[in-house]
Structures are given as C-alpha cells and as structure tokens.
Amino acid sequence: MLTTDPFSSEHLPQMKKLLLFIFSTVAFTLRLAAQDQPNVILMIADDIGFSDLGSYGSEIETPNLDKLAYGGLRFTQFYNMAKCETTRSALHTGRFLKGKHIENAIPFSTLMANSGYYTAMVGKEHFTSWVPARCFAVNAFHDSFVFYKINSFFVRPETGQFEYPFRLNGIRIDPEDMDVHQKPLFKTDVMTNYALSYIDKANDNNQPFFLYLPFHVAHYPLQARPEDIAKYRGKYKIGWDVLREQRLKRQKEMGLVPADTVLSPPEANINKFRGPYRGNIYKYRPWDSVDEAEQDELDLEQSVFAAMIDRMDQNIGRIVQKLEDIKERDNTLILFFTDNGSCPYDSNVDFAVPPGPAEGYRTLSAAWALVGDTPFRYFKQYGHEGGTHTHLIANWPSTINPGLNHDMAHLTDIYPTMLELAGTEYPDTLDGKPTPTLDGESMVPLFKGESRAEPDIIISGFTDRFRMVRVGDWKIVKVNGDDWELYNLKNDPTELNDLANQNPTKLKELEKAYLDYQKT
C-alpha cells in the first residue's frame, strides 16, 4: 500500500522510453488514419456537485463550460465512484472495483500512445492501493505535470511550498521554477499554462493528442484570487434553502430532472468517520435561524467556492481558445465531469483565518455542499445520488449534435470510448498474463446520436460501507455500513422512499448481481 509519496525511488519507472509500453502479446494495434483520430481533452473537476455549473442549474458563472454544454451533450444520468481515489482508479483501469488480474491493468493512455497519440497529463493524481504502478502518470503519459492527492492553490506561507510537491515528468519541481505567468502563483492557472504548452507540442509534431486535465477545483482548501471572490460576495446571503429551490426550478426548466422531482431532505453529514467535529458549522440549520454575523461568514465561504469554479471556467476558456487558434477545435472531443459529489467534511485547519487567502485552510460547510448536490441526497463518499451522480458534458463540433442525453452511463465507459476513438483494441494479455475485464462500454454511439444497450450493472460508493448498485431503474445503497436500502429511481430520483421492506425480492436480486460481479 502506498503510504508515502508514490514518486519515491521505489515507484519510479525505468524512465525515458519514448513509447511507454509495447506489448509483445499484441501483434499490431488497429489504427485509423491520423486525420480520423480526434484529439481528446478529458477534464475532471473535484468535489463539485451536480448543480454547481450554470448549465446544470447554478448561479455560478461558468460561461465557457456552458458554451460547451449547450453546444454538445449534457448527460443527466452519469455516475462516478463517489470519491477522489476510487473514481481515478476506475477511470484508468476500466474497473468499478478491484478484480481478477488487476495487477495487469493497462491505462488507456498507454494504448492510445501505441496507436499514435501524444499523451499528456496535468493535475491531480490519486489512486487506491490496488492500482499498479504502470497507471501512474510518469509511466502512462509522454509528458506530465502532476501532484499527488492534495495540495493548496496558493503556495502555503508556512511551508514555502505545496503539501505534496508537483512533479514534472517524475522529477520534483518547486514553485519558483514553474511556468507561472501571473503572480501570485495560483495552481489552476499554472496547470493550464502547462496544458497549453503540451497542446502546442502535439501541434508542432502534427500528432493527435490526448490531454488528461484533472483540475483540483473545488476541493478544499477554499482559496481563490480576490478579484474572483469579489464577484460573488454578498450573493449568497439569501441562504442555502432559497438557493436549493432556485437551482431545482432551473433544473426542471432545463429538462435535467423530471418535472415532479422533490428536493431531498436537508441532511447533515452523518459519516461518523469524517466528522462533524466542530458543532453547528457541519450540521444543517434553516438559514433564517443563523444570525447576521455568521450569515456574512458563510456568504464568504460559498463565495470562495464559487470563485474557484469561476477561475477554472476561465482557464477552460483559455484551452478552447488555443484549439481555435491552431484550428483543431472541430476535431477535438472535450469531456468534462466531476469525480464525486460535493464535500461536507470538516478538514478545517484554523478558524481564525477566513476562507480565501493562502494563509487559510478552510472547507465547505455541509449545508453548502447540499446546495451543490441539488436535488439529490447526501454527499461525496455516499452511494446515494448526491455522492455518485454528477454532470457530464461532451462537446465535439464535428460529430456531436447539441442536446440532453438521458441514457445511463458510468465513468468506466470512458476507457472503451478512448480505445474506439484511437482505433485500437484492448489486449487480452500483458506479457502472457490475462488482463482484467473492462466494465464499461463505448459512448461513441451516444456521441453520434445512436443508441446503445443499457448497462447490465452500475456500481459506485466509497467502500462497502457506502456501496451502491444500480440495475435498470432499481438501486440498492448503504449508509455507513447500515442495511441495504432499495429505491426505484424512475419514480423516486431523490431517494425519498426506501422500498427494502416492501420489495425484498428485488433487493435480493440486486444484491446477487453485486455478489456475482465480485467474482469477476
């Protein structure tokens, strides 16, 4: 199990092999002509709820993402793995959970590279312990500028650096050596600087490219540039209760949720392993019961959160503009989703310092997190819809027609999607040993306006204590290790009516589907 920096000498590869992995058991990869291979940019946000984008009901200003959303597909039933490391593990291995032959998992970026793509990663890297070392960026991409797990957005003054250092192609790089441009250094901006340089590199080499861009926004700590915070200051004094109603109203008008959708109850975090530790701040209270001084503090908290998303959107605009400048926009598929629902957990370091500056290390209150997850129940880690159901935007001007897509999809579908786009196949073996079975199916038919078969099963939730299993309209889910709950999501999308006692046969059917999956 990795308990320290995964880039220590123990985990560093035999570096500088230009082609990342060549599999002797694969005779040849199937290739499309270079002009038929689209560029792909895969962006992942962090701890942003289903409703935190303008195109999904938010008041937060996300014009660049909204343009991508309204000009492409907005998925309404897209699932993740409910937590940072579980989502990333599933993405790069193609598996919901650890299974047979997982030690032979091959990252799809490697297979894309073998099919002629230039591959690059910029951003957060975080895996569960079962993910093999070949999936780490330094092994899986031609170029990478990454950090492991979590670090601040500004340089922390007491350390002079980030908690987990950045690595440029596996070698530590300090803030003073980074491509900063705008001071003070702000991580989202710097990440984009490197992403743009990698796009230029691919363009100069006349290669199709795959750019993986896992932004850290809007994971704690709550830090943002002052000019971005100022745009939102005071707008959140209407409170979380009114905001949830407003967002749900917009979602219904947009057709994102059924017209009869009812808001989930205003629950607080009940995960005994993750707080609450400091009293009322992490328990839901009606907004009108909060005194004026605290309302102002909470307005600042949500304003910083909004500012972080706003800054990410500004940087996404820079990337889209780069594609237009090099005349690659039409042939570039952009995907954007979030690794899990909003985060309600108390990881505050010092309440004496407010959210916003580099000196602060603050986290979002549970009631604001619930706004992000509108209209769903619960949060990050949970298998309930608030933890595992987030947005997905797919924009590809040459191929995708604008609209909503209501098909069920899961982030494990991205792996086979990338292989189809690259014109390559998944190998049955690695060095003569079986590779793990992929759980997803390509989404390319959906991008082309065609249909595909409904997934046999969808699994999510962080650990078995929060596991969820969905088959068709039916779903079973646990809360912190309690008994299975059962919901019909077609009739009850916000999980208000537990049918476990009324329909034990259906519950057993889904439980068996889960047990059968665990054998694969």
Image (cartoon, rainbow, N blue to C red):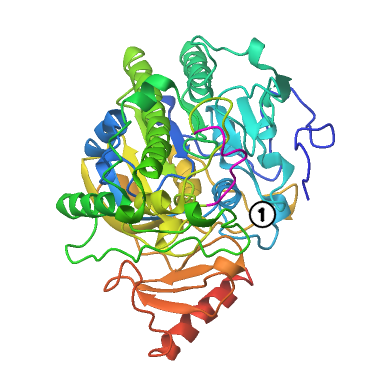
The answer to which of 246 and 400 lies nearer the viewer is 246
| SS assignment for the magenta stretch, majority | loop
Q: Is residue 296 left or right of residue 431?
A: left
Tell me if residue 30 comes above or below residue 254 in the rendering.
above
Residue segment shown in magenta: 345-354
Identify the image quadrant of the C terminus. bottom right
Tell me if residue 345 comes above or below residue 214 in the rendering.
below
Q: Quadrant of residue 60?
A: top left
Please identify the residue farthest to the right as the structure is shown: 10
Image point (32%, 48%), residue name: 51
Whether residue 377 can be seen here: yes
Whether residue 443 can be seen here: no
363 in magenta: no
Image point (26%, 45%), residue name: 238
- The amino acid type found where label 1 is placed reads Thr
What is the x, y in percent for residue 236?
Answer: 30, 40
What is the x, y in percent for residue 122?
Answer: 55, 28
The answer to which of 167 and 398 lies nearer the viewer is 167
Image point (39%, 89%), residue name: 503
The answer to which of 17 and 306 lies nearer the viewer is 306
Q: Secondary structure at mark 1?
A: loop
Residue bearing the label numbered 1: 435
